[in-house]
Structure formats: structure tokens, C-alpha cells
Image (spheres, rainbow, N blue to C red):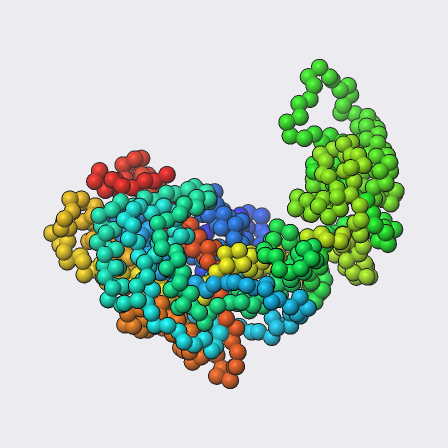
Amino acid sequence: MVMACRVINKRRHVGLQQLSSFAETGRTFLGPLKSSKFIIDEEYHKSVLISSTVRLLESLDLTSSVGQLLSEAVQAQNNTYRTGTSTLLFLVGAWSSAVEECLHLGVPISVIVSVMSEGLNFCSEEVVSLQVPVHNIFDHMDNTKTFSQLETFSVSLCPFLQIPSDTDLIEEEHGLKDVTSQTLTISNLSGRPLKSSEFFKPRTEVEADKNTSRTLKNSLLADTCCRNSVLIHSRHFNRTDNTERVSKPDEFQKHVTATLKTYRCKDLTELAVGLSHGDHSSMKLVEAAVRLQYQNACVQQGNCMMPFMFDISRVFTCSLPGLPETTSCVCPGYITVVSVSNTTVIKELQNQPVRIVLIEGDLTENYRHLGFNKSANIKTVLDSMKLQKDSSEELWANHILQILIQFNVNLVLVQGNVSEHLIEKCINSKRLVIGSVNGSVMQAFAEAAGAVQVTYITQVNEDCVGSGVCVTFWRSSPLDVVDRNNRIAILLKIEGINLVTAVLTSPVTAQMQSKEDRFWTCAYRLYYALKEEKIFLGGGAVEFLCLSSLQILAEQSLKKENHACSGWLPNTSSWLASSLAIYRPTVLKLLANGWQKYLSTLLYNTANYSSEFEASTYIQHHLQNATDSGSPSSYILNEYSKLNSRIFNSDISNKLEQIPRVYDVVTPKIEAWRRALDLVLLVLQTDSEIITGCGHTQINSQELEGFLFL
């Protein structure tokens, strides 16, 4: 393990400094041109090459409480969405620095928490105007369509256009016209506290008139000064509460649909290319997997009129290091690797349908299910003697083999471990036993073959045995696909099985983990886009809209501050409300600076700018234009319609006739923001309790009113 090196000032908030230190190590992972890192373990003198946030944190020393919280947040994001981890890590660092600056300026902690939470909520509401509906993707799908179109698309390395798996900046398609100039203002008018679980369901009020729009925003500022904010922190950063808000979904959806009419996505290939973020090879495999599932569903249903949903739980990968990348492909059925000692067995079985047994637990002599209680009155004599143990295992293996012979079973899939001695005996009797099989694979074979899963093989009867499974080599020449661990790839399939396997190959063994990570990132991105039936416009539009909207909100708050110079707001009797008005512009600007740093780092990492300062200047220029326009969302949509736009298409050749659209998934992106801010605010409160005493943070009794920390 290695340490993230940075000088820590113990007189300041140590936890926030640690977050900034950890986040600094992942800056080069933003953008399409990810810079791989060599992680060196000084204790064991070993090194490893990594190129993702998850693998980075696995290699760092995160034994501190802050490190563990950061690791949990990143792992929760990765385990659920498989994308957004680099965004999460960077924003954790940027907003930790913003909070430190707030503390340095004397902003009360309760005000920091309140304003930053409401600021991010405001951003989440504003970016709804950049959502694109995804409907009828499969209604007119050509099942015979090839995937060559994916290979013809290339992503230009342009400013604001080059974001890979979890940073979200890529180019937009040329020819999007008739962008409406209507302003969509998303405001909170309910006046009730916000919960973290509600951030995904925006409250909306749509107004076409710009003056009315600004009035609503001003009303929001006045309203938030007088209401309490509720911040709910979860140590594991997992939310399942889907509480509905009071909103006007029908009216809002009508306006959004009208605004984004020309941006509707109706083609699977277009959607896949837009979500690939430059990783076309991985996304091509994912699209092929979706098409195979769709074709199988049509065959099973007898037609393609029924609604289809991509089932990512029935997609699996088989990594074969040492083989050329050209052998990567997607196949229906289950592909796995077994020892080459099984070659003779597979040759014997491949020309005939075989009967199958499915075992849920381990297939070993000593395996007992959870909850099994051994009889206390029975003692085993000489249990440690090898002779007796070998004799006992031999008797057990012979008994199991007799059961397989009795029911004419030639294939056994086991979810757990398998006795090596039993495997050898089965090979000699032309039977194949495969262990460590995923539960979804077991279920798929149970459905297709008519088998019933059992805990112990002694429970097998005729009703539990499935049939019709085909066992064959993955390639016609098995010796051509033997990996460096002396294993061979085989294919198990049966008519109607809902399983798809992506075979991932690479001549460089060290790249296999990264290749598999990229595949799942693309797969989950497409899965959530199809599931939610909505996506964001890509190319940095969402982050840029957050930045510009917060800047405008800060300026509006600054004007209201003049009414609070005496320390009290009119018609209020709360010190907290007065403090919110005074410090809100400062906190909002520092929160916006996090987006500015995010975009600047992205542009700098593309090597199109000599420094982050130059990239920041470029962003500031367009930020001023967006602010002057009076409607940042309209400005962004208008820029997307221009081929020669300097913000999104500055490096795209005018001779290019077609530019693929670029999209981002909605919930994974917003959840990465939420987790980042939740973590920062949680560490802020923890630091304050350590500095000032548990339960006595730098908040007086009036400040505490209305705030909840869990």
C-alpha cells in the first residue's frame, strides 16, 4: 500500500485536507486521455499500473477514517453505476477546498451546509432542461444490422468534447436546428425542507417569460432565507428512498419535450455511440449484447411487439489474456474457462445434448449449509489422520459419482467450490464439473433446461435434472485459445437461454482488468439510459450549465445582501436567516469554483491548453457570454446547433458532414455529485466536533435550529 503525500496543517480541518490530498492523486483520470499511474509499494518494492479511480483507491493506504469514508463512497458509486467515480473523486477535492476557503473567510458551518446543499439542488433542477428523451429504441430495430457504423465514428479531441467513461464531455452532432429560445426556469416553490433522496425528482415551474423567470429565482432566494434545510448523511452513501415531490410533471415534461424536440434519440446505434465517450470497441460489444438479448426475446415471444428491457444481470464476461484483441466478441450462451485436462471430456460431449445438475452450494465432502448444527453427541476418532481422511473423501467421491451415473448426468454446474478429487474422477468417467458459477447463470440454465437447483447432490432426483444442454469449444481449434494459465474456453448453450457472454481478449495481461472495467462502464451506461428513458446532452453542457447558473444565482444573492447589512432581514427574526443572506453569495461562488476547476482540468488534460489557467480563461469567456444572454440553457442549446461553435466544436473540420451526438446518463451523474458533497459536508461536521468538542461545533443554538445530521 502507498500513501498519498501532502503536507497537512494540523491547525486546520485535517479531514478536509485529507480529502483534498486523496483527490489530487486522481486528477489525471479526468478526460479521454487518461494518464496511467504506477503505484509503488515501498514496503514490498512492488508496482502496479492503474488507470481508474477505483483501482487507484485500492492501491492507496486508506486506513484513516476519512480514507475509509472516501473509499465507501467511491465503491458505492462504482458498484451501483460503474461510472462517475472520477467525477466524484475530483469534486470531493474541489469542494473540500471550497469549504476550507469558506471557513477561512469566517462563514458559519451551518451556513456552508445549507447554502451548498441548496446550491447543488438548484443545479440538479436546472440541468433537467438538458435532458433528452429516449423512446421507441427497439420499435424499428433491424436485427440483421451490422456494427460497422460504430467503427466509422471517431471522437475529435476538442475542448468541451472529450470525456470518457465518467467525466462526460464529448462532441455533439451537427445539424441540430430550430432550438427554441424559450427559457426554462426550475425553481423550488414548495417551501419545505429537501432530503437527499429527493434530489433526483426535480420540482419544477416553467415560465417562458425571462422577467418572470428571474422573479421566480429572486423569490427562491427570499424563500430559502426563511426556511430550514435538512441534510441527511448516510455513512454508506446508499439511498433507496424514492419519496415523490409536489410538482407539475405533466406541464414540465410538455415544455422540455418541445425544447428538446430536435434532440430526441430514437436509434440504438446512435445512443450507443453517444454514450461510448470514445471507447467504441467496448461499446460495440455492449450493443451486440443488447441486440442478442432483443433477438432472443423476439423468438421467445413469437414477435417483437412486446416491450423489451435490457437485462444486464444476464450479461457476463470471460477474460482471456494472451490472445489478440481481434478475437474479442459476444456470443449467446455461457462461455467460461476450464483446465485443458477437460479437453477429452468436451470432445466426447460436444456432439450430443447432455443432462445437467445445478448445485447451489459447494460440492465438497465437508460442505454444510448455513445454519447446520452438528450433533454434539457424535465424536470423530482419529479425524486428523491423513489415511482416514483420504479414505473418507474417496468413499464420498465414489458415492457422488454413482449418483451422476444413476441419473445419466454429464454436466454439473456448482455455484461454490468443487473437490479436486471429485473433478478428477468425473474426468475419467467423461463428466464435466464446473465450479464458481454465477447465480444468474445457474438460474438461466434452470429456466432453459428445466432443472431444479439443489443444495446437496444427494438431493438430486429425476425431477431436478435438466436436459438439452450443448457443450462445445468456444473456437473450432481449441489449442488456439489456451490462455497462459493453461485453461481453455468452452461454450455452454441451450435453445432459448437468456444469457450473453462477452469474450474480452488482449495480448497484454496487465490490460485485462482495465479492459473489463471499460466494458462494464459502457454496459451500465447504456443500461441506465434505456431504463430511465432519458439522457443528458453531452459535451460538458451539464457542468457548464451548473457553473453559469450558480454564478447568476450568486449575483442575485449579492443584491439581496444589501438589505441585510444591519445583520437582520426584514420580516424575519432568525439570526440564521440573516447569516444565510450575508454569506450566500460567497458560498455559491466557491461552490461554482468547483465546477470551474473541474472543467479546466478536463480541458487541460486533453493537451489542447498549455496550462489550467489558459483553459480556465477559455471557460470564463463563454461563461460571460452565457450570463449576458440571460439564459445559460438557451445559450448552450444554441451553441450545440453550430458546427463552428468555439465552445463545443472548435477543432472539428468544416468538411465533416456528420458528427455523432454525445450523451451522458442522468442518475449516475447526479448521484456522483450528491455523494461528493455529502462526503465533504460529513467530514466538515466531524472535523468541527473534533476541534470544538463532540456535540459543540461552531454553531450556536439559533444556527442549529432546522439542521439534522445523521
695 vs 167, left or right, is left
**Residue 620: quadrant of the picture:** bottom left
Is residue 687 visible in the rendered image? The answer is: no
In percent of width and height, residue 96 lies at 36, 52
**What residue is at 29 percent from the left and 46 percent from the top?**
192
Return the x and y of residue 452 as percentages of the image width and height: 73, 39
**Vertical order, 160 against 701 (above or below):** below
Give the quarter of the figure containing the C terminus. top left
Residue with the most extreme bottom position: 655
Q: Above or below — where is 373 with respect to 700?
A: above
Q: Residue at x 69, y 22 (%)?
A: 374
Residue 478 visible? The answer is yes
Q: Is residue 606 left or right of residue 446?
A: left
Q: Nearer the viewer, residue 581 or 181?
A: 181
Q: Residue at x 75, y 42 (%)?
A: 451
Numbered disc total:
0
Give how far across and how far down residue 264 sits, in percent.
48, 68
Q: Position of residue 666 (x, y in %)?
A: 46, 58
Residue at 45%, 72% in the rendered image: 262
**Residue reaching furthest left?**
566
Q: Image quarter for residue 361? A: top right
Towards the viewer: 546 or 197: 197
